[in-house]
Image (spheres, rainbow, N blue to C red):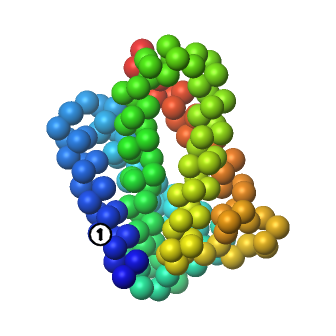
Amino acid sequence: MIVRGFEIVGIAIYVAALVVALRRRHPVHLGLFFACNTMIVWDWVFNCKWFFNVAWNPELTRLWVVQGEGETLAGGLAFVAFYYWVFHLLWRGQATLDARLGTKQFAILYLGFMAYDLTFESLLIHGGLYRYYQRDAFLLFGVPWSNMVFNANLSVGSYVALRHARR
């Protein structure tokens, strides 16, 4: 039940992002949606046994399988849910962040993205959608602590690039 529910919610979030991107017809929104979709391939490459060693719940719908390594619909949709809406809001709220936080926003966002990743992933892991097979010393609530740093680096770097796109 959790598995199908997550896939249904993921599809709804995905469709909503697509509708917003198409309605706005702005290169940033369309590019952001496209970029989130390309993350599906990144997810597949990094989450196989080669790097993060993730085991997906076998009940999840598979998008593809190559030499035994598959990508799930849920994994792909999670990137649109995780990134599109956050960057959509950051794009729209950039002036407010600048006015209220100035340059401190980058440090705050960095820590915020770390907490966001930990919260988002630990909920999915404890919901039984996937599991990381790494030593316990490298896991925090089931999430590799390196994911938090990696996500914060990727997200703040992307936000800086997004800000430059506005110029």
Residue farthest along the left direction in this orientation: 23
10 Å crowding of disc 1: few (<14), some (14-19), many (20+): some
Left or right: residue 74 versus residue 47 is left
Extreme residue in the right direction: 137
Q: 5 and 147: which one is in front?
A: 5
Give the position of the N terminus as an image quadrant: bottom left
Return the x and y of residue 44 as percentages of the image width and height.
Answer: 51, 66
Residue 64 appears in the figure: no
Is 75 positioned to the left or the right of 150 in the image?
Answer: left
Instruction: Determine whether 77 is above or below 136 in the image.
Output: above
Q: Does residue 37 sit above or below 130 in this rendering? A: above
Q: Residue at label 1?
A: 8
Q: Quadrant of the C terminus?
A: top left
- The residue most toward the front is 100
x and y, in percent, of residue 120 in the image: 53, 58
Say which element carries label 1: helix
What residue is drawn where x is 43% and y is 37%? 87
Residue in the picture at 68% in, 66% down: 141
Q: Taking the image as drawn, is residue 147 in sight?
A: yes
Taking the spot 56% from the left edge, 73% from the top edge, the residue there is 126
Task: Please tell me whether residue 61 is drawn above or below residue 31 in the rendered image.
Answer: below
Judging depth in this view, the residue of 132 and 62 nearest the camera is 132
Q: Is residue 57 above or below residue 114?
A: below
Q: Nearer the viewer, residue 137 or 53?
A: 137
Q: Which amino acid does label 1 sit on?
A: Ile
